[in-house]
Structure formats: C-alpha cells, structure tokens
Image (cartoon, rainbow, N blue to C red):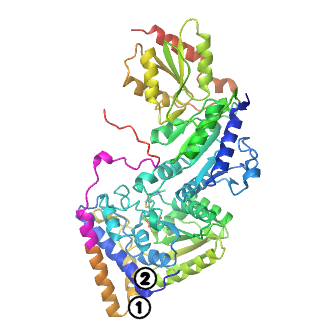
Amino acid sequence: MPRLSYRRALTRALADELARDEGVFLLGEDVEVGASMVTTGLAKRFGSDRVRDTPLSEQAFTSFATGAALAGLRPVIEFQIPSLLFLVFEQIVNHAHKFPLMTGGQCAVPVTYLVPGSGSRTGWAGQHSDHPYSLFAHVGVVTVVPATPADAYGLLVTAIRHDDPVVVFAPAGAMDLREDVDDLTPVPLGRGRIHRFGDDVTVVAVGHLVHDALAVAEELAGQVSVEVFDPRTLYPFDIDGLTESVARTGRLVVIDDANRACGMAAEIIASVVERVRLLAPPRRVTRPDGAVLPFAPALDRAVQPSRDQLATAIHLTMKDET
Amino acid sequence: MTDADPVRLYRTVRLIRRFEERAVELVHGGQIVGGIHPYLGQEGIAAGVCAALGADDVLAGTHRGHGHVLARGADPARMLAELCGRVTGLNAGRGGSMHAADFSLGVLGANAIVGASGAIITGAVWAHRRRGRDTVGVSFFGDGAVNEGMLLEAFNLAALWRVPVLFVCENNGYATTMPVAGAVAGSIAGRAAAFDIPAVQVDGQDPETVRVAAAAAVDRMRAGGGPELIEARTYRFDVHHTFEHAVRLDYRPPDEVTRGRARDPVRIQGERLSAVDRAAVDAEVEATLDEAVRFALASPQPDPADALAYLYASGMTARTGGG
Ligand SMILES: Cc1ncc(C[n+]2csc(CCOP(=O)(O)OP(=O)(O)O)c2C)c(N)n1
Ligand SMILES: [Mg+2]
C-alpha cells in the first residue's frame, strides 16, 4: 500500500486534473517553482501556460480567473496565505459567486481557490494564521476542509470539476499527515464521514482537528463512547448525515479552529438542534471571539482549540444529562 | 469587420438615447424600480467602440451600462424587460439595470462595482485566445474607476501578458458628485503610460471619432499588439442616478451643463445623414421601442418561489430561510 502525504495528495490531484482536462490551469504566486511545495514539478510537466506565476496582484488575478472561467476554462488559484482571502473576498463573493444568478443562468464560474496551509502555522503570527472558512459558508460559496490525504485528493479533484466556485482549505495542521492509500477517487461534496463510531456523543471536528478528536476519543474510550464526524465540506453541509449520527448519540460537541461568534460551530449546532432533541445542551470548542493569533508559540497554542478543551466539553455534555 | 456605416452608427446612438429616455419615464412611472444610471450624453462612446468589434469579441460595462449592451446588439425589448424585472429579460429578471448581460453577444455584463470589469475581461480574452480564437475585449469604466487598485492591477496583468484588451475610460468629469480634478492625481492617460499601455484621448461626443480610434486600436491588437487605452472625454447630460430627480444635488455649475449638453452625439452623428435617412431611422427606432415597452410591460413577473433559481450553475440548491 503506497503511503501518501496530504501535501502530495494535493499535488497528485492538481496533476491528474491538469492531465485530464485541457481547460484546467493553475495560477498563483511562485507556483512555477512550487514555493508551497504543493505545485512542485507541475510547471515543468505542463508548461508555464498551464501553471502560471502571477505578479502580486491577488485582486486582479482572482477576477482574471473569473473571466477565464466565464470563457470556458477551469482555473485553480493557489493562495500563499489564508488571509489573502480577505483581500479577494470581494472578487470571489461579489463577482465569481454572484454571476450565475445575476445573469439569469447565462454562465458558470468554475474556479477553485486552494489555500495550502490554512490556520496556524506556528510562529507566523497575526496575519498568516486565519481560518476564514465560515465567511465563505456564510455567503454560500462551496467550502471544503479535507482532514486526510485521501480526502484532500478526492475533494480537490471534485472541487476542480465542480461548476461553481469552491474554496479548498488545506489546514497547516494536516499538511504533513501521511496515510496508506490504495485507491484515490473523487469525494462528493456535502457528504460527511464518520471516522469512528460511538454511542454517547457525536463530536464534529473540522479539518486537522479530526485527528485531535480521534485522539481524545481514544483517550476517553473506557469512559465515554465518542463518535467522530468529519463534515469534509462545510458548505454544502451534510446535515442529514450528522442528524443521523446525533439522533443515535443524543449529544453534540463541535470543535472548529476559527473564531467563535457566527462561526461554523454555531451554525452546525443550530442546524442540528432544529432537527434533533438533544439529551444535553450542545457544546462548542473554538478559537475565542475576535481571536488574532499571537506570535509566541505558547500564546498561539492557547488561542487554538485544544484536546483538553475538547475532553472537558465532552465530560460536561455527558454530565449535563437531563 | 469594422462597421463604418454612418447610418448604422446614428441608429445606435439614437436607439440608446431614446431607450434611456423611455427608461427614465418608466422609472418615474414606477415600472422600473431602483432607478437607473442614465447613459444620456455618452451614447457615442458605446456606439463607436462596439462598431469596431467583431463577432468573437467580448466586453464588460459599468453601472451606467445600458448603452454598452444595446450597442453590442442586444434585443432592446429583452433589455427593457430586464430593467422591469420580468422573466423575459436578458437575465430573467435577476440582474436589472446594473447587471444586464448577454453572453450570446459576448456581453459579460454591466458590473456595478467600480473598476471590476478590467480584470474579468482580461481573463476572458486570455482564455478565448488560449482556445484559439482571435478575440479582443473591451472594458468600459468611468473616470472614478482609475483610482481603484483592482483596475490598475488589471492594467498590469494585461500589459505584462499582452492580453488585447481595449480599456475605455468614459471621462464624464464626475464620479457621482466628485469632479475628476478632486480625485485623480496625475492623469488618466498617465495611468496607462506607467504600464507602457498606449493611450489616446478622443472626443467622446463624436461617435465617428470614437469608432475610428477604437478600430485602429482593435486592428493593432488583432495584429498581435497588447492592451490599449482610450480616454473618451464626454459629458453626462442628466443625473448620476435617477434618485437625483427627486433630490437636487448642487455640484455642476449650470453653465457647464449647458455647454456640455451642446455637444450632443446624437445630433453630431445625425447631421451626417440626409434628413430623409435620419427620419427613417428615427421612425424605425421609435417603432422598435414602442414594441419593446409593450413587450416588457406585458411580460410575466418572475415567480417568488424561484427567487434563487440560477444561484448555482452546478444545480446545487440552497436551504430556504423560513422557519
Ligand atoms: C467600488 C465601488 N465604489 C463605490 C461605488 C458607488 N458608486 C457607484 S457609481 C459611482 C461613481 C462612479 O463614477 P465613474 O467611475 O466616473 O462613472 P460614472 O458614474 O461617472 O459613469 C460610485 C462612487 C461602487 N459602485 N463601487
Ligand atoms: Mg464619471
């Protein structure tokens, strides 16, 4: 069984789609050399017409990709820093996302925005460590956060083939994961994945936190039977899959590496409690409200959701039984 | 490909003029909600530029965008139906005045975000050419847009990658109420010069002058040249937006307005026709617009149950918002 890293899974997905479809091309800063170590080798193989370095003009090249998509191509843009999404939020939301509806269905904008290394990179501080996925879910742009190498491959392939804009967050905390994979296949959007079955509580974990949730579930195994649900796609969200899980366990905890107010955890909890009567109040473990990741490593860690916080939340929800 | 026929050029400016006048009436009558940004006075620019384009070319416009869509040949009846929010509209009533688009004609839409169209058109032209077409593109924008970073980034990309885009700045002297002198450091043509983009200033009130300048630029671009810029000096005859018909804003001196309105592109081009030809065009345009108004107002309203139709090209559907 070949062992595949998360980072190489992304490379493989890009290479396979570039090879499969002439309309696919990659744009970004330093993608020809492959500074992110995701696009490594692609310019050599596909040429600089298909794998293209851009000047530092995020707003222009994001809308350039929109235009190319309107003309029938399938651009993929790599962003070096998650916070660059703030710079191009206007171009993605106001143009790429809105064009199909505003034109009455005259066009499609199949662009993929790939963010390798989203979230904390340890030591990169305030402007390089955000995880703004809930913003895209809020505006209704397809948003995926794969947790494993196989899902990174499968979701990136699906994103590229999808006819609407898709933002792919590849968390820094997952980039160096490896797993044995036999078979790499596209993963459908909006379909969650249960990594571990359990009876007492469903933990929804986003991105790299899936692995933390699995570790906590293992630790607590003698005391609490924890189910770990990985949504994989935040928008559209597999609410049916999660409802099925929570209907069995009766309890819900969400762990999500982004700010608390109006965050994904809030949305997930609201969507579940609209449908399921829980045995205990749900809990969420997130970054604090308004968090800016401080530089010093201990501070950076202190702001990110931790395994201890998750274990505590699980215990609390178990005790809270009504 | 260039259409040098003075009668056709006159018909285009006359059509836009009368379309806009009718649209303003429909705003006042309540049939068009939200108002419009009338293109009155600037007709010669859209007409002249579009007369220089070929069938495979693409363009994107602005919030003041009716003229660009009509000059490209969109059906005035479906355009008016769009302004009235009807299902028969170009955008099935989903776009309205500021987003009217006709992809079948390469009109990638009016765009209501100032400075946004340049990068979109650059990408579209680059993509069409990569697919083997001889496409050139036009990005229309106002004098206000030259202070938007996004547009200047697009200048850089187009020049760097030699994407044949004609950047057309419709300098009507104001961004809403802000005069150019109060907003633009340096000059508009100087923006282009910074990127080695050839730029010319033309009299935007003369449709034929605009056409000749655009045709020359398009010829050079088709022969392998990179982007060019035309600064068309023009004057907006009426309000920034029809809301000003209700609230008088005091920012243009009356004598300036009088002088500006004296140079009328419809009259200037009309004088190149015989009285007989002109009368024939005027009558045909009137009949076309009578029919357009009738069509628009008789067209069905969209069904609120379909309010989010077309949201996703992939066919995905969105959760509803109700309880
Ligand atoms: C990015 C952006 N900023 C502000 C506005 C609001 N706005 C709409 S039109 C306009 C003035 C634009 O002036 P100009 O570009 O000269 O075009 P004109 O209206 O004169 O045709 C403004 C400020 C907007 N639509 N987009
Ligand atoms: Mg202006």
Up-down: is B188 above or below A252?
below
Say whether residue B197 is left or right of residue B184.
Answer: right
- Over which residues does the magenta segment extend? B291-313
The image position of residue A189, as x and y in percent, is 52, 37
Residue drawn at point x = 71 percent, y = 37 percent: A8
Would you place residue A162 above or below residue B49 in this image? above
Q: Position of residue B107 (x, y in %)?
A: 46, 65
Q: Residues within 10 Å of mark 2 (few under 14, many from 20)?
A: many
Q: Which mark is residue A226?
A: none
Q: Name the front one of labels 2 and 1.
A: 2
**Residue at the disc numbered 2:** B9
Give the residue at mark 1.
B272
Does residue B213 appear in the picture of this structure? yes
Q: Residue furthest top?
A: A222
Q: Amino acid at mark 2?
A: Leu
Image coordinates of residue A197 in percent, x first then y, are 54, 17
Whether the residue carrying mark 1 lies under 8 Å from ligand 1 is answered with no
B300 relative position to A138: left or right: left
Are the residues under badges 2 and 1 in a single subunit?
yes
10 Å neighbourhood of mark 1: few (<14), some, or many (≥20)?
Answer: some
* Disc 2, SS: helix
Assign ligand 1 to one image quadrant.
Answer: bottom left
Q: Position of residue B28 (x, y in %)?
A: 25, 65
Estimate the spatial distance between the alpha carbons at disc 2 and disc 1, rounded to whole Å.
10 Å
Q: Residue B17, located in which quarter of the rendered image?
A: bottom left
